[in-house]
Amino acid sequence: MFPVGKFRADRHISSYLRLDAVAPLYRQLPHFLIISAPAGYGKSSLAQDLLRHHDSESKSSIWLSLDDRDAEVGRFLSLLAVGLAKLLNVDEETSASTEPYYKSDAGLLTDTCVRRLNLIESEKSPFVLVLDDYHEVQSDILNKAFNSLLAYWPANLTLVVTCRTNCTLKLAKYALSGGCERVDLDKLKFSKAHICDLAAEQQQPQVSEEWLAQVMDITEGWPVAVQLACYQLRHGAQIALDDVKYHSDIAEFFWEQIFDELPEVQKSLLIACSIVERFDASLLVHITEDADTPVLLNQLLSSNLFLQKAKDQSHWYRVHSTLRTLLQGQFVLWNHKKQQAYVLRAIHWCSEQGYMDEALYLCQRHGLWNMVAGILRDKGEEYVSVGSFEFLHYWFEKLADDLIASDPVLILYHVWSMPEYRQIHTGNLWLDRAEEIIEPVLALKEENQAVIDSQRVLSQVLALRGYVARISGCYDDAVTYSEAAVELSAKVHPAMLSRLYMTLGQDYYLRGDLLASEVAIQKSIQLGKQYSQSHNVLIALGYLIATLALSGRFRDALAQYEQCKEWFCKTGFTDLPQAGLLSDLANDLYREMGDFELAKQGVDDTQKFCKVAPVGLPHLVSNIRSFRLAVALNDQNLANNALMEAELFKRLLGVSWSFGWAPVEAMRAQYEIRWGKLVDADEWFLPRAELLFETDEFAHECEQFIYVEWLIAKKSADQAKRLLDRMACHAIANKRVLHLMKVKIAQALLLESADPVQSELLLMESLKCAGDEVILGPFLEAGQGIVPILARVKVRMYQDFDALKLLERLNTAALTLWPTSDVALDSSRLKTLSKRQMTILGLLVEGAQDKAIARALDISPGTVKTHLRAIYRKLECNNRSLAVSIALEEGIQFLASKEQQAS
């Protein structure tokens, strides 16, 4: 989560002494303002004073305080996107701190920022964005990402950047036109006149020339040191800028005037949180901004007192360095009991506020492993529900097995977080232990909360057993366990049903029961939306698309995808980096539809997301999809790269199941068949030949298609034909329309040379299977050799309107893939006719005579005859019977319908 204080609209700083060198900025803010100077020169004070001054001009502004954690491009762009959103909706009640931070694809976040910049440009009012401490994040990579946004920067959005080092953003073209102004160290130094003005403003006694000379000599006009000297003068203290006295003055001021006034709880939080490695001022602001207590830390922030000993390390408006030292020093003086009490308060607060990393770090630092276990137990479901298994795995690896084994809920989250190879080998042993713990409670007959909780645990144990069975390839066992889990959870844990129905649908799908899979997954999506479980809806949608596509219902699959996508937009999911996974779901669908460009775009989007995400299943799945697309495109280089990546991630993840596709090893064999050495493919298929030839299990069906390729390459056409016949019968029996089409196409290509007529009949059956669905992929994947057969088939299907539409689309796609193809599938002769000639030919097909045509078109019979002669000439015929026959063969009814839709 973003800490509160990242976005500060008002920093409550003390009044700023306006220097002569920056006076023009108060009259007119430039489009880009870069304030560069070392620490303590009042860069942030100047920026804040400019905002305060220009507030009277109704400029909406947002202040983004950066630190070194924000140097990661994904985090920086996420912060920027949130800041731009807050600019557009300054009255938004939801705090920016409630927006989660995800390591994400920079491309998606850049698009989000560009969309919001365009929205700002559409507004008439001016806006100001301040990036404070840009030096903390500046790098070549981040500058490159930010420079790409500057091309879209709206004229009504002023950018103010404060930086200790030279800001290297590409703003030269704006400087030439006067749109960029730079303020450096020399413009921010105090002169003697400025020091006198500052003393007078603070109602100081009249200062002497000697005192002024001493201050200028020591401080050299360094504003923060001048401020400290004036503070000491105001309190009657002698000037003391030496290190020891200076540090003691700060400590005395802090303990007497700030810390002692804080409530006890806030004191403990300040001290304990100062130990956290990621401690920063923003976290402290959150601690002290309590509605029931005074806001005191802002006084500390604005006091301008907390300096490092060396000038080049000071950071006058940030307190965390000196403050952390003071707090930790006080913490060490306390006894162990008081230290632990303060730490426990801090842990509870961090956990309640969602600072999970900080809470767990404090537990680890002080050896409070029972509290680590408690936090994981309480928050585990939240991480499982969004798929954050890597986070859980990291912390479970630090816990002792004995501690985990004593709590059945911890065991569940531990098994969820395991890599899959460990789930297969040790998952059931851990689940046995969980059942042993809850068994005595389940034996009780009374209905109390303990029994209900144990039943909930049992439902999740059953679900996990089903998951382990599924990844082990035991799909019947997986269905049995998942059905039992759903039945029990419906009674005691309805909120879990979305995930359980999703896993049940996966089990049905992998077993080949498409109808049951669709019903279960639809229930999962419905319940996921009801309980706002985006992750469950995302995964379930992927399986629903696969189920509907395999059934040949591509229109339904697209409709479900768009419907869920609309729901994701409403919930704000599409603005998050995980939206990259959403674009990946329909990739197989687009590929089977023959829209290879959309499929490739989805693969690219997912791979961009994967580059900045922890290694997980999306990495493997994306490369498997990329390989399948490369096979469809016959692209050897893309296939080789995708396959090597898939093999790498399979080894890293230890995944042993195939997601309903052919396993990665079979894909390697397919690569060798098409582009490599056939003998290498033999090593994969020879030990499995008997299984693949005889099995009817859906889990092996994708491998069987590759096995057919291998048989044909090995000159075993008869054996390939027998296997295809069996696969066709099985696909018909289980209503797998897509696989039936692929089988028919493979049979047609296999018989083309031996029996062309039978080949045409098989291809006609494949076209009829498609119906009115747009399924081009199986035909295009078959290669250029299928085009001549389709051309012969078209003449025989002139009465099938859906087939003609499909053939027209195939022609367009084929010309794109194979521009040198000699055979065209489109209605080439009909397209030479004019619009009037097409109308007359259409009436001719309907049986109209010359006089009827003349009356219908309000022309003379002689004109009709003239048009008919032109039609005969273009169609290369000499009478109306042949013209009608040619018109029907080339699909005049389809062309007429298409022209009507276009008009």
Image (tube, rainbow, N blue to C red):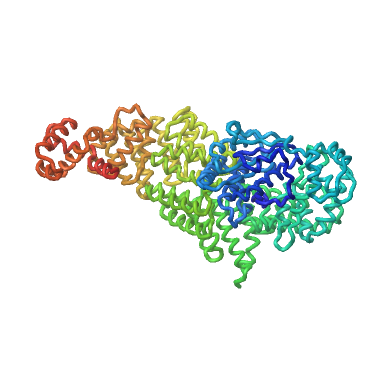
**Residue 790 vertical placement versus 46 (above, below):** above
614 or 868, which is in the foreground? 868
Q: Residue at x 50, y 57 (%)?
A: 529
Q: Residue at x 44, y 52 (%)?
A: 563
Task: Please indicate whether residue 212 sits to the left or right of residue 764 in the image.
Answer: right
705 or 110, which is in the foreground? 110
**Residue 230 vertical placement versus 647 (above, below):** below
Q: Position of residue 341 (x, y in %)?
A: 79, 59
Q: Position of residue 198 (x, y in %)?
A: 79, 46
691 or 112, which is in the foreground? 112
Task: Please indicate whether residue 717 sits to the left or right of residue 104 in the image.
Answer: left
**Residue 702 vertical placement versus 56 (above, below):** above
Task: Please indicate whether residue 42 sits to the left or right of residue 385 in the image.
Answer: right
350 or 765, which is in the foreground? 350
Is residue 656 in view? no
Q: Quadrant of residue 47?
A: top right
Q: Position of residue 131 (x, y in %)?
A: 65, 43
- Image quadrant for the C terminus? top left
